[in-house]
Amino acid sequence: MDCYSGIKQVRSELLSGDVKATERTKAALKRVHALEPLLHSFVTIDDDGALERAQEIDADVAAGRDPGPLAGVVVAVKDNIVTKGLRTTASSRMLEQYVPVFDGHVVEKLSQAGAVIVGKTNMDEFAMGSSTENSAFFATSNPWDTDCVPGGSSGGSAAAVASGQVTVGLGSDTGGSIRQPAALCGIVGVKPTWGRVSRYGLIAYASSLDQIGPMGRTVEDCAILLQAIAGFDANDATSVDVEVPNYAAALNGGVEGLRIGVPEQYFGDGTDPEVSQAIQTALDSMEAAGAHIQPVSLPTTEHCLASYYVIAPAEASSNLSRYDGVRFGHRADVDEIAAMISQSRAEGFGAEVKRRIMLGTYALSAGYYEAFYGKAQRVRTLIRDDLARALDTVDVLATPTSPIPAFGLGEHVSDPLSMYLMDVCTLSANLAGIPALSQPCGFTSAGLPVGLQWLGRAFDESTLFRVAAAYEAQTRWHHRHPSLEIAS
């Protein structure tokens, strides 16, 4: 039984009777536990729940019932997506003991599709970070080099997928938190259009930016997983009621005549030369396959970082105000109410969360709202318009996902500004609400993965899957897996 099997193979083996869901789930759980001392991908592992679900799927197959498009597929879910009866912490002391009484919409969709959820993955606390080192519990390691970070904030899901602990995973992306760890761990990650996937049950960081999306080892796996979780949800006021196309049908479209725009602003001095070279080699191969490569300019790109780091902390300040020890979250053992609230937040939140709450509160305060938050929102509109104009002239945009490959654990943890710069290539998609996809396009001389990012028009994930599948078909990067010593 191959731990790196894709969704179609897993489903085929299940329906043919070659591999039962319980067999695959037991093997996956064994691998999860064996690799956890090395990787620390998971905050919570649900052995009993996963095996019970696998038994239900086997019973469906035995009775001749269709268990769904994700039948028997082992899935990891980021720990800021609520799961009924299964602890959900957002990797924060504030929610360390929180056990939800309902499932998030995407979790319901996974269950309906026949998936087996084996656990909740580690992340930067409340999704605030780019390395998964801001978790209140422990840092996650990169499977390609365990002395390096896996990226963040969805680093646990990325590491679990890359290492073969699970077939696919779910992450959330506020400023690149699916795509950047996907790039650093050598897998595929997709941030859908804002509103494509319900956020009901996602613990909010910045509501106008957050989006749940798939992470997998191949473009096909991400297309199938997105198909399963996308769609309108009346419980989410920001969910958009538009038809979900057949993403798998787009995978064989090829790139003959496709127009690919390359924004010059994404290849500046801060981009590692090996990353730039890998992207250029990928673009050369796309051109050889019949795509038209042309330069484009996105002059507002330089303002993305400043705009994002006003808007996101401002929304975080509002969203996290509910965690006060009275309504939600950790409660300090203090009698006086004002002191109890203050102490609860001091004990429950980590340093990065406190930093962003303070930044956001300042930006929203009287006398500063218009100078900071209002101006950042106007700049956001300019960024969105810039991207729309560019995507009127080309079908997709191609950029690096991360300007640098994975860096060492602890290397940037004391320098928040350098950590924020890790998101410089991914922020624009969130600010504009458009879809984006990262896929592996090579390795550095040190053996670390490099990610290629595609950006597309709103609700046109199909074109992203089309171009990414065409590139993947020309390469073998997705067939490479990290060498890991399994604990006995």
Image: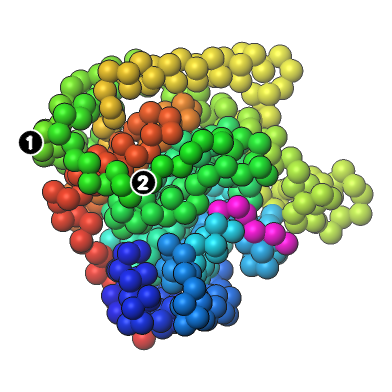
**Can residue 407 be spotted in the picture?**
no
Residue 259, compared with residue 231, is above or below; it is: above
Give the image location of residue 240, x and y in percent: 56, 35
Give the image location of residue 233, x and y in percent: 61, 44
Give the image location of residue 313, x and y in percent: 60, 33
The reply to whether callout 1 and callout 2 are in contact (CB within 8 Å) is no
Residue that badge 2 annotates: 247
Element under label 1? helix
Residue that badge 1 annotates: 288
The structure residue drawn at horizontal position 26% and vertical position 65%, both measured from the top left corner, is 482
User: Was residue 102 drawn as part of the magenta stretch in this picture?
Assistant: yes
C-alpha gap between disc 1 and disc 2: 25 Å
Nearest to viewer (mark 1 / mark 2)? 2
Stretch of the chain drawn in magenta: 101-106
Amino acid type of the residue that numbered disc 2 sits on in the rendered structure: Tyr
Q: Is residue 401 left or right of residue 133?
A: left
**Can residue 64 be spotted in the picture?**
yes
Q: Is residue 53 left or right of residue 162?
A: right
